[in-house]
Image (spheres, rainbow, N blue to C red):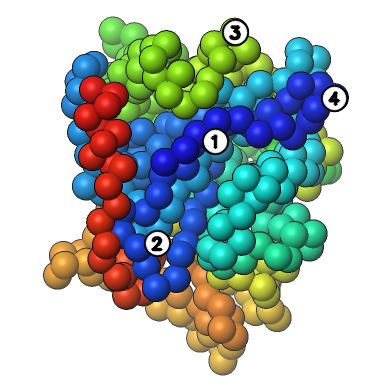
Amino acid sequence: MHAGYLPVDPKHHGALFFWHFASKYTSDKPRTVIWFNGGPGSSSLIGAWAEIGPFRFQDENTIIENNGSWHMFVNLLFVDQPVGTGFSYIDMGALIHELDEMANHFVSFLDRYIEVFPELLQNDIYLAGESFAGQYIPYIAKEILTKRSKLKLRGLLIGNGWIDPVTIYESYLPFAVANNLVKNNSVLYNDISNQLRICQRALSKEVHVFEEECYLIMNQILSDGAMNNHYTRKEKGRCVNVYDVRLDDTWPHCGTNWPPEMKYLTLYLHRQDVMSHIHVDSRKSEWARFSYSIFKTFRAYHSEPSVKLLPDLLQKIPIVLYSSEYDLICNHWATEKMIDTMTWNNRTGFDMGNGTLAPLVPWIVDNEPVGLIRTAPNRWKWSTFIEEKEALLAVGTKLKILSVHYFGCKWEIEVELAEDDEEFIEEIN
């Protein structure tokens, strides 16, 4: 395990923070997953400590092993990016705005990382993440494939991804109706329908990664929506959790307080002894799970949405898109529609090439149904859409199933236990 900073913009004192966890078991072929959280502005240490990383918080003072960690099968590299996110930093006034700037910074980070840890060149590399990482990952993949061919990029995994703004914005109202957040043909339904038409007119002129005319759709659902299983709208200051509509949260957070152990992570990463262990200078950076400065600045106004990059990427590497059943903000309806209407390799959607569609079949793990899965061949490549029966975004225990499917079952693992995990728990607790 190692952590620290690497420079990406010396002129403006810009550096990205990283935290690497070695695979618990060695493999016949070393693999590294580089993980990104979304936002823009969400720290990837959320992924490390609340999702796929080796450890969990039992309470404020106790760290335990996460038996659902992806590091059972692969090395994990978490990077706080873009600059200004999490522990990463840059001069005020030098924050970046566009996706190509972000990708350039990230390959600069990889160049520096390889200088210090050249063993990465021997690893198969996978880019993985969630939400707005659906924009980051394709851009970084394109940059690696075109300019850093020495890196062995082998695939992409994107969960509940913000990839195609058009299908996402258009999915909100029907998804809200299907999940009893808005009543069909109600006054609210008609109001949101009118706002959707305004949104669609704006998108018909030019599609941006974010479209201001479309924001009000989600705002109306959250502030004025109908009943769900947990509460009545506006009662006691509650709102639906946008990451799992079966849950609620305090207004106006609506999911950003979730998962609850995040409060322990914030306290932990503000400890001086912890920052010293991971080579953080508290005079330069203080960790926050989300940077509102990045969210307001990184609007990618001149960037093409990443959905436009997928057809070319699919000709070179496999892509796995996985979605949960109950995520609202980056929901599976939008992902399915995006795939169904996307042309790649002279095919549309999940066309098998003979006029038939790849079937959506039950996904069975340990003799239990855990979701639905669809696979389309792409010569030697393949693209998969997985619809989980539980919420995946920010729930690492559910991601364990995906890691076993993708990293555990697809390759044989030579078991050789690494020692630094147990040492770390003893040292930090």
Quadrant where the C terminus is found in the figure: top left
Q: Which residue is mark 1?
A: 18
In percent of width and height, residue 90 lies at 72, 20
User: Which residue sits at x=71%, y=48%?
Assistant: 111
Any part of residue 70 in sight: no
Sequence order check: which comes first, mark 3 or mark 2?
3
Amino acid type at image mark 2: Ile
Tell me the mark number nearer the camera, choosing from 3 and 2. 3
Look at the numbered disc 4 and give the secondary structure of its residue.
Answer: helix
Tell me the mark number nearer the camera, choosing from 1 and 2. 1
Q: Which residue is mark 2?
A: 386
Q: CA distance from mark 3 to mark 1?
A: 18 Å
Disc assigned to residue 283: 3
Q: Which residue is mark 4?
A: 11
Look at the numbered disc 1 and give the secondary structure of its residue.
Answer: strand
Sequence order check: which comes first, mark 4 or mark 3?
4
Amino acid type at image mark 3: Arg
User: Pointer 2 and pointer 4: residues touching (CB < 8 Å)?
Assistant: no
Q: CA distance from mark 2 to mark 4?
A: 43 Å
User: Which residue sits at x=47%, y=38%?
Assistant: 2
Sequence order check: which comes first, mark 1 or mark 2?
1
Left or right position of 46 against 402: right
Q: Nearer the viewer, residue 378 or 324?
A: 378
Q: CA distance from mark 3 to mark 2?
A: 43 Å
Q: CA distance from mark 4 to mark 1?
A: 20 Å
User: Pointer 4 and pointer 3: residues touching (CB < 8 Å)?
Assistant: no
Q: Nearer the viewer, residue 146 or 347?
A: 146
Within 10 Å of disc 4 (Cα), the crowding (few <14, some 14-19, many 20+) is few
Any part of residue 127 in sight: yes
Sequence order check: which comes first, mark 4 or mark 1?
4
Within 10 Å of disc 3 (Cα), the crowding (few <14, some 14-19, many 20+) is few
Tell me the mark number nearer the camera, choosing from 2 and 4. 4
